[in-house]
Amino acid sequence: MRELAAFFGCEPSEAAVYEHRLATDPDEYASRLLRATGTELLLVDDGFPPPGEGIEWRELGELAGCESKPILRIESHAAEEIPTARERGYVALKTIAAYRGGIDRVSDEVVAALEANEATGAPLPVQVHCGFGDSDLWLARADPSHLKPLVERFRDTRFVLLHCYPFVREAGWLAHVYGNVWFDLSLTIPHMSRPAEALREALELAPVSKLLYASDAARTPELYYLAAKWWREALAEVLPPDEAEGDGRAILRENALALYGLSSGPSP
């Protein structure tokens, strides 16, 4: 609330921030927060919020004043859609197997999707929800180390471990050991109260080239702003001063462009 109050120029209280929110046009309010992040390119999971309950990925990009691209959620699409995902503009696949029994027991449907993806000869990256989330998730079964058999089976597929808390070290280990594993700290940042500590754990084993910025922001525009601000502050605190600019740019931008095979404009 203090961060948001400073941004909006109002009293540092929940009541004042909420009053400002109610008094502002919703699109204008969201757009101001999104544009303050300095985002060049948004990659948006098309499976949440459900259709009709939120802003779809194209409109989100318009509000943010940047390009946006969709990510196909495996559980929300028919299996036959997987091989043509790239042709239809998707830049990655995503699974929420952690919410469907756990990533220690990935369903046959998800495995079939991974097989279809790899059979294309140019598989899209596959994002996997790991670590904490809502109450319908069993945390012990969301430990990314359970993915070891899939990572080894689908060696041509680039896996991206999302969120990861409290299994940040486990995710870092996988990214250290396997060439086809990357990870982020979305949801961890901004929700964890000590973002710099999580970042230090992430980089204990994993190289800078394997860590990605992400926010996991959805529905609530404030989270886009807070995630971007606190990621930058944590990077400035953790990275050595003589490496902070280059490594920070890699984590915030370059690693994702390379991983997803994307291009963007000049770095801001």
Image (cartoon, rainbow, N blue to C red):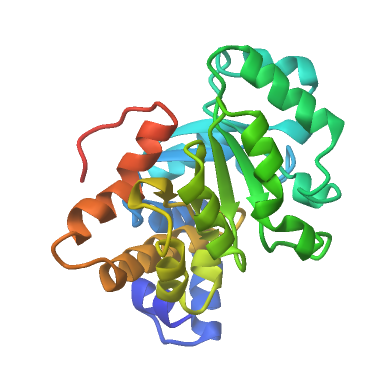
Q: What residue is drawn where x is 54% and y is 83%?
A: 14
- Can residue 48 be seen? no
Regarding residue 211, the answer to whether it shows in the image is yes
Residue at 40% across, 39% down:
256
Residue at 67%, 30% (x, y): give it.
153
Q: Is residue 155 above or below residue 190?
A: above
The percent position of residue 25, horizontal first and vertical second, equals 50, 57
Q: Quadrant of residue 37?
A: bottom left
> Which quadrant of the view contains residue 85?
top right
Q: Position of residue 112 (x, y in %)?
A: 78, 24
Q: Is residue 208 left or right of residue 165?
A: left
Front one among 156 and 78: 156
| Image x and y of residue 64, in percent | 41, 45
* Between 31 and 43, the one nearer to me in the picture: 43
- Vertical placement of residue 6 versus 61, above or below: below
Q: Residue furthest left?
A: 242
127 displayed left or right of 62: right
Q: Nearer the viewer, residue 172 or 260?
A: 172
Query: Which residue shows up at 73% across the image and 45% down it?
Result: 96
Number of marks present in the image shown: 0
Q: Does 77 sit left or right of 183 as displayed?
A: right
Q: Quadrant of residue 15?
A: bottom right
Residue 5 locus on image (x, y percent): 41, 79
